[in-house]
Amino acid sequence: MDENVLARLVPGISRLERTGDNTFASTLAIKLGPVSGSFNGSLELEELKEPESFVLKVQQKSSIGNAASAIKIKLSPVNEQQTEMEFNGVVKLSGLLASMGQRVVGGVSGTLTKQFFSNLESELERKQSAST
Amino acid sequence: MSTNGLIGKSVKRVEDKRFITGRGKYTDDIILPGQTYAAFLRSPFAHAKILEITTEAAKAMPGVIAIYTGEDLREVNGVPCGWQVNFKDGTTMKEPKHPLLAVDKVRHVGEAVAIVIADTREHAVDAAEAIMVDYEDLSCVIDPLKAAQPGAPLVHDDVPGNVCFDWNLGNPPGEVDEALKNSAHVTTLEFVNQRLVPNAIEPRSYNSSYDEANDRYTLYTSTQNPHLIRLLMCAFVLGIPEHKVRVVGPDVGGGFGSKIFHYTEEALLTWCSRKTRRPVKWTATRSESFVTDAHGRDHVTKAEMGFDNEGRITALRVKTYANLGAYLSTFGSCVPTYLHGTLMQGLYTTPKINIDVTAVFSHSTPVDAYRGAGRPEATYLLERLIDLGAQELNIDPAELRFKNFIPPFDGVNQPGYQTQVALQYDSGNYEGVLKKGLEMAGYENFRNEQKANSNGKLIGIGISTYIEACGIAPSAVVGSLGARAGLYEVGQVRVQPTGKVSVYTGAHSHGQGHETTFAQVVADKLGIPMDDVEIIHGDSEAVAFGMGTYGSRSLAVGGSAIVKSIEKIIEKGKKIVAHKLEASADDIEFANGKFTVKGTDKSMGFGDVALTAYVPHVYPKDLEPGLDFSSFYDPANFTYPFGCHIAIVEVEKATGKVQLKRFIAVDDVGNVINPMIVEGQIHGGVVQGVGQALFEGADYDENGQLTNASYMDYCMPRADDLPMIETGSQVTPCPHNPLGVKGAGEAGCIGSTPAVVNAVLDALWKGGYTVKDIPMPLTSERVWKAMQ
């Protein structure tokens, strides 16, 4: 996994450093409705089965609360041109994030997911144009 | 005794001038020389191990004076519980330590982990954010039913099954089972009385200082009972000699129960003020209030009421799981038991009653008394059951109540009513309030209109007839039930040499208007103008050891103590006058502020007598100078206000939206000193009760996060949610206190909730939707879903 690519894909990421084989330290800025803050924490790739799947474990801390998530991402080829990407996971929020941001969390996660995919799209386009 | 007509008059509140002009003085307004400010780092988790706390970076931040964590307070006691309840087998309830700062583990979101003391509030908050804590998140449990199940995550390792105690009251369970079995009909209801967040307008605030020169402490605190706080903090937590501590509850902006309790922050700030030799102040932010002010209610109940063929109640069986939160708050144990179980008789002649309560810990904010405290839960249970019974038996709910009411008794010519659940009611006329309520509501007309249902709207009427135990409380009785304090009150009346009067009461006013009501009583009894009377309260240095204000007790208990002192003053005054006017004390009469020798025109004014008492030149030889008396009054019984609340609602078929169209409250609170203040209390209470029925409720998610911990998401009732409240009254005097008063602080909140819910269910039922229950709050979504 190329951490530079990961940094470009994950919305709100401002710093990503490799700290181990599959672990990274990160700084993220996220706004969740009325609360926003800068998160420090770790990203960890587990159950890595290149190129099919991995679990992305994220632990983030901030003064407005903590977020912990485990997201399983699975890639399966549909045909030569297409790959299906499946992802699901759980996110646990705590502190102000949970008490103030709860009712917008669905909307925000939707937006972030969309952003992730549009980042992924432009990344793929970039790669494609680089390779052609 | 004399009267100048002040008792019974709607005198405008004298304290309001300072409140509405912004001149009230609250704890946060107090700035002491060398003032410092505290901020807390609080747990974001409901249940987690504290692995490591790093404070170095925070300590180096600007303005920081000190930072303490639970580790620094390992040897300091936790805050105590004021009421011991025993398990059914006689063993003592489980009382895990409630530490001032979390040690090793956090047990609810908002629990304090560290305190920062800095030169400004902002510096303290910044430094608190810079403290790093490593937690290991653990699984948690919030629901009281789930918490009591085997295998549930434990809140305290030494409390098996999370059960603090189990408790039973009433007739032997076998007798109640038998009576239910033999009943013609049994109405069963399983329901939740949801958790509420108190929301006083003034957040909790404390300012504690230590005077090294004299080894003395002063704590300013937003409390309902300064002496109780001093006792608990000194004797149970910090081990400071009580006479070295002054506790002041200045103006306090609302309590509703949430400011009775001795909170960890009070003791911790006092401890810190000694450590740092600086005054330390903290005022909760609204976000902190949501997760740290003790919450209210949170019962899960199954209740069964049996009826015979005529609709007479044969028996009542209740099983309640009460959520205590993560720790025992000061009176957390007595709310679901002695303030709840003992009210299961209601207004009815139910011959067999048994209630069983299991009180459990969970990973949530502690739960304690909130306006009504146990009695709203009891009333909700009974009034929902009898209404559901009426629907099921197809009897009019008003008729079913009349059929089952305890007949009127005045407690003088007829004895008090002995219930099956320990209490003896003082006096009551229950059918009277229902009759009056029905009349005000135009009940028959409404029923006809409802039957005709001409416009296809869902309209409903809900009745609630309640009783409460107030005037808390006879010390010997509550002592035998586990209270760790007496519940008398003290009242000192100090007549100054010029005849002006200073009154010191142990009751504490935080919205009740004591400065007006108590002054009315004193001025009326002494026949002097109200302006000549000053009510002093809330300062442990000024007032003798008093018990404070809660449980609708101030006038019934505190007012009675003042009356006792007034009686002593008049008696002494008679001796002084007798000597001066050369008559016998037995021949002196006191009326309208004047002492007169019976049958003569020889008299002395109250002011002259006062002056004589302090300038005793011509004075009885065996009489002490001065005119200053203090009395402690311990009531003979609780007082039992009661009433009838009626709600009329309209439910929108398409959306389930409930609109409260009318609200009628007929309350019998005994004699009334100031009708306007009583009405205000009823209004406030009704609004809070309607809030529970339609809007409010603390929502915890499965991770133990309070997800509606702000005014964006926690719905408080607003003026435009309510119709004008129509009040009516009836007076059945309390037979056992000198004022004949019963208390009015909680009535509105106790009677109103079931009236509203009954009205909504009546609307649905009469509209053809056979809905047994909708969990509160009755939001549009919940009502609509129930209709589908």
Image: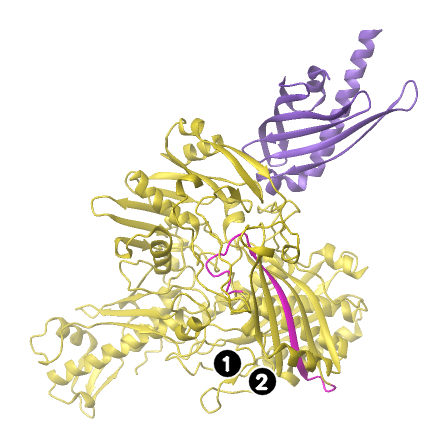
Chain colours: A purple, B yellow
Q: Which label was assigned to residue B406?
A: 2
Determine if residue B65 is in view.
Answer: yes
Magenta stretch containing residue B431, yes or no? no
Are discs 2 and 1 less than 8 Å apart at CB?
yes
Residue B285: percent from left, percent from top: 48, 43
Answer yes or no: are tags 2 and 1 on the same subunit.
yes
Residue B345: percent from left, percent from top: 58, 78
Residue A104: percent from left, percent from top: 67, 39
Nearer to me, B624 or B191: B191
Q: Which residue is mark 1?
A: B425
In the image: residue A106, left or right of residue B345: right
The N terminus of chain B: image quadrant: bottom left
Q: Amino acid at mark 1?
A: Tyr
Q: Is residue B320 above or below residue B21?
A: below
Q: Amino acid at mark 2?
A: Ile
Residue B738: percent from left, percent from top: 37, 80
In the image: residue A47, left or right of residue B726: right
